[in-house]
Image (cartoon, rainbow, N blue to C red):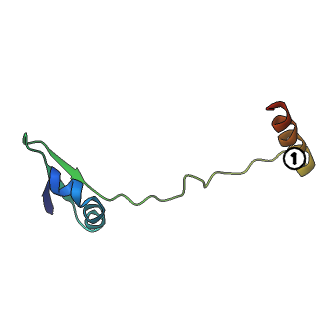
Amino acid sequence: MKVYTYSEARQRLADVLNIARTEEVVIKRRGGETFSIIFRKSKKSPFDVPGIQTKATTKDILDAVRESREQGH
């Protein structure tokens, strides 16, 4: 476990986050508060969403997009 003062952690944030990938990092504030930084690997991308079935064709979608852009002017 690595311990940094708030000022050290702020100045070296990229390093602190890289260290947190392999071990816990603790940041101490002047008033005595402590905070732990722990790396959590995301299991899936926020963009990994399930698809849907629809009867809309590509032409229908492009027409809808074109129409919405024309209304915006």
| Image quadrant occupied by the C terminus | top right
The residue depicted at 32 percent of the width and 59 percent of the height is: 39
The percent coordinates of residue 20 (x first, y second) are: 27, 63
The residue depicted at 55 percent of the width and 52 percent of the height is: 46
The percent coordinates of residue 17 (x first, y second) are: 29, 61
2 horizontally vs 57: left or right: left
Q: Is residue 4 above or below residue 63?
A: below
Q: Residues within 10 Å of mark 1 (few under 14, many from 20)?
A: few
Can residue 55 be seen by looking at this rendering? no
The residue depicted at 82 percent of the width and 35 percent of the height is: 68
The residue depicted at 80 percent of the width and 47 percent of the height is: 53
Can residue 41 be seen by looking at this rendering? yes
Q: Is residue 8 above or below residue 29?
A: below
The image quadrant that residue 40 belongs to is bottom left
| Nearer the observer, 54 or 5 | 5
Give the residue pinned by disc 1. Answer: 62
